[in-house]
Image (cartoon, helix red, strand yellow):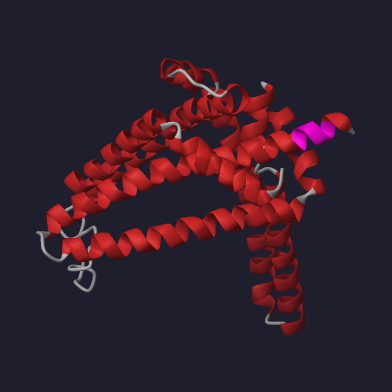
């Protein structure tokens, strides 16, 4: 299956799983509404308040927002596991049971958490090495050494990006093939390495589509916020963003999972 077919399949899966989109919409909306409730008026900009100086946020509020953000990330992993499990079921069998969402979220939680932490750790190691190289050569005041260090740091950065792209299919391998974290990473690297630029193109196209749709929605909701209060405008923006994120999140999951199934089938044939 080609890239455009995978994207088309993603939209098709999303349009036929409205119940799942509603679940993700509610989850995202809770996060956005809590943010609005915690932050002082004007901290979240609308068209009306975009040019205004945002109000100061107290350390207590910042700490509360940070704690809730951490909680949101942890719960997001549960939501990701449930969503991926259901998308897999629909692609493979043409139907899903919403009652299985929670069981999938719990089943894959620790593996998805471990996968995310491991990828973050590897990225941090690469970033630290690049930073240390720059820091070690800066005090020398030697242009040649600085240039060489910058080239090496850039090479490490590009290698890190390449490595992350190789791992982009890891969650789908983990869910679709019921394997552990390390095995999922290995299978993703094997599959993506053979079609690296096609995976990059799929990712870029989905990002461009998301940006395009988001831009249009932003214009529409922006004009609407001009005729209502600032706080009501923030709520409207939150509702629209939550709905879009829920819908397009399923589109991306389904598109990547469809493409992964194609790659996995080729691996089996070979």
How far from the left and from the top, in percent, is residue 77? 47, 32
* Vertical placement of residue 108 versus 186, above or below: above
Residue that appears at 50% across and 20% down: 104
Residue that appears at 25% across and 46% down: 35
Image side of residue 114 versus residue 102, left or right = right
* Vertical placement of residue 75 versus 196, above or below: above
How far from the left and from the top, in percent, is residue 145? 75, 77
How far from the left and from the top, in percent, is residue 140? 69, 77
Residue 126 versus residue 227: which sits nearer the camera? 227
Q: Is residue 264 magenta?
A: yes
Q: How many marks?
A: 0
Quadrant for residue 15, please give it.
top left
Residue 235 versus residue 265: which sits nearer the camera? 265
Whether residue 45 can be seen here: no
Q: Quadrant of the C terminus?
A: top right
Whether residue 258 can be seen here: yes
Residue that appears at 72% across and 42% down: 1
Q: Identify the magenta region.
A: 263-267
Image side of residue 192 versus residue 269, left or right = left
How far from the left and from the top, in percent, is residue 230? 13, 59
Residue that appears at 83% across and 34% down: 267
Q: Is residue 76 magenta?
A: no
Identify the residue at the far right of this view. Answer: 270
Residue 23 versus residue 3: which sits nearer the camera? 3
Dominant secondary structure, magenta: helix
* Vertical placement of residue 259 versus 50, above or below: above
Quadrant for residue 214, please give it.
bottom left
């Amino acid at each position: 299956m080609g890239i455009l077919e995978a994207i088309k399949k993603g939209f098709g899966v999303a349009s036929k799983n409205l119940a799942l989109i509603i679940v993700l919409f509610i989850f995202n909306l809770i996060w956005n509404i809590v943010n609005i409730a915690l932050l002082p008026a004007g901290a979240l900009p609308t068209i009306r308040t975009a040019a205004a100086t945002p109000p100061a946020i107290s350390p207590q509020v910042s700490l509360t927002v940070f704690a809730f953000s951490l909680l949101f990330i942890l719960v997001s992993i549960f939501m990701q596991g449930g969503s991926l499990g259901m998308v897999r079921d629909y692609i493979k069998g043409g139907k899903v049971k919403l009652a299985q969402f929670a069981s999938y979220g719990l089943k894959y939680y620790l593996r998805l958490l471990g996968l995310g932490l491991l990828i973050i750790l590897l990225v941090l190691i690469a970033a630290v090495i690049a930073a240390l190289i720059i820091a070690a050569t800066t005090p020398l005041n030697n242009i040649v050494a600085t240039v060489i260090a910058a080239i090496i740091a850039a090479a490490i950065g590009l290698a890190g990006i390449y490595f992350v792209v190789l791992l982009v299919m890891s969650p789908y391998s983990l869910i679709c093939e019921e394997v552990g974290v390390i095995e999922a990473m290995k299978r993703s690297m094997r599959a993506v390495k053979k079609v690296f630029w096609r995976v990059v193109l799929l990712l870029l196209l989905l990002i461009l589509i998301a940006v395009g749709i988001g831009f249009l929605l932003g214009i529409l909701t922006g004009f609407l916020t001009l005729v209502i209060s600032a706080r009501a405008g923030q709520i409207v923006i939150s509702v629209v963003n939550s709905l879009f994120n829920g819908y397009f999140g399923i589109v991306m999951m389904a598109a990547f999972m469809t493409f992964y199934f194609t790659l996995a089938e080729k691996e089996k044939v070979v």
